[in-house]
Each structure stands twice: as C-alpha cells, then as structure tokens.
Image (spheres, helix red, strand yellow):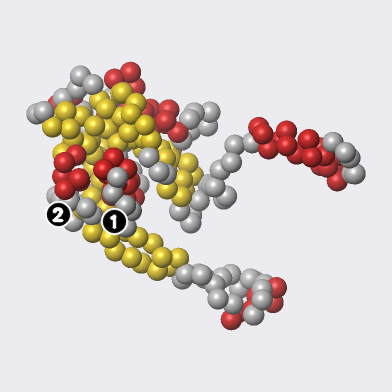
Amino acid sequence: MEKFREKIIKKDSNNIAKIKNVLSEYKAMPLDTKFKAAVIILLIDIDGEESIIFEKRSKYISQPGEISLPGEKVESGESFYEAAVREAYEEINVESRDVEYLGETDYLVNGNGLIIKPFVGRVKNYSLDDFKENREIENIFTVPLKYFIENPPKIYKNITRIGFNKDFPFELVPNGRDYNFSKVENKVYFYENLNPVIWGYTARIINRFIEIITKREEV
C-alpha cells in the first residue's frame, strides 16, 4: 500500500491507468458502514394463498418482542444472500435448497452505519407446522400477501436534531454555530391493524416490496 501511495504522489504518466485499475476492482459501498445485515421475505402457500413468514423475537436476543423477517448479520466471507438464507435456516429451520430465489428489493442504510439488504424467496414443500420456535424466536406466523397489497402502512415522522461534541471546530465552518446544519427527518412505518403490530424497518421493507410488485409510488 505504501509503495502504491508513493507512486501516486510522484509525477508518473501511468498514474491515471493505475487509479483506473484500482477503481475497476473496487466494489462501492455506502460510507461509514459498520454493520451489514440481510433479511429475506419468504413467501409460502397457506391454504392456497401466498403469505409472508414473520418471526417474533424472543427475550433472549436484541430487540425482544419485535416482529422481524428471517435474517441478521452478514458474516465475514459470505454474501448478503448467503447470510439471509443461513439465518432463515438457523431461525426457522428452512433449508436453503428449499428456498426459490425470486430477487431482491431496495436496501436500507441508516445514519448509524447499518445497511440492510432484503431478498425475496419462496418456500417449497413446507407447511406452517414445519417451522419450530427456538431460543431466538418466540413465535412464527404468516400474514397473507393480499393484506399488505390492500392495506398500506401508516407513516409517522420524527426529526433528529444534530448534536455536537464539545471539541467540534465550529470556527472552520462558514458562519460557525449559525451554519444551517441539516435536520434528519425519518419516516417510521406501522401496520397498525395487525396483531401483533408490524412496524419500523420490517414494515418499511414490506411496504417497498409491495410498491415494487404493484408499481405503487413511494410516499
């Protein structure tokens, strides 16, 4: 790395070619990504109706009691999709060979460096009785796909105001403390009429999936 930096700094007619070569092999990612996760929207036929599989997280893991899709952290050396199907197996005992890959949807990046990539698949040759709760998952249930098509979520907004450390160099910013620093407006999605309520990132991912397959415009 140091040798490459020295070559770039020195005047060299091949610099542009070297930069192009480096960038051609580089895979762009959102800046400041600290945590990569993947989830999968699993469709399953329940009594002749396509439904989506959800989990209720147990009290033994983070975000206890919340409703989520199968998925979690991307481990070193695996792709986002590999992480999604691995977690589906660990959480609800669905073998990757029994998941038909249907595609992926828009992914989320938040201000804390979290990136979540959602995928869509269909479970073959399973019934709801085949899914077993475990230490991580308190309950497994389904909601008909039709429900989400017919019932858009309620959207609320919250505004996050920027805070600064004591040593923030306001003197280096035009207008200093009077600079018009942006405020972050977040949309929080709720399917309020479901029991249990589906909200937050899970609701937003489901809503975007529905928008894509029905070509509805995002609010």
Foreground: 124 or 218? Answer: 218
Q: Is residue 16 left or right of residue 122?
A: right
Instruction: Determine the residue positioned at 38% across, 40% down.
Output: 105
Q: Is residue 42 above or below residue 188?
A: above
Instruction: Determine the residue positioned at 49% across, 28% down.
Output: 78
Residue 189's disc number:
1
Callout 2, which amino acid? Asn
Which quarter shows the C terminus? bottom left
Instruction: Determine the residue positioned at 32% across, 52% down.
Output: 217
Dot 1: few (<14), some (14–19), or many (≥20) neighbours within 10 Å? many
Separation of marks 2 and 1 at Cα, in angstroms: 12 Å
Q: How many marks?
A: 2
What secondary structure is found at the residue carrying circle 1? strand
Dot 2: few (<14), some (14–19), or many (≥20) neighbours within 10 Å? few
Q: Is residue 214 above or below residue 185?
A: above
Across and down, in percent, residue 59 comes to 27, 45
Task: Give the residue at the far right of this rendering.
Answer: 11
Across and down, in percent, residue 73 comes to 43, 38
Which quarter shows the N terminus? top right
Callout 1, which amino acid? Tyr
Q: What residue is disc 2 on?
A: 193
Foreground: 72 or 201? Answer: 201
Across and down, in percent, residue 57 comes to 27, 43
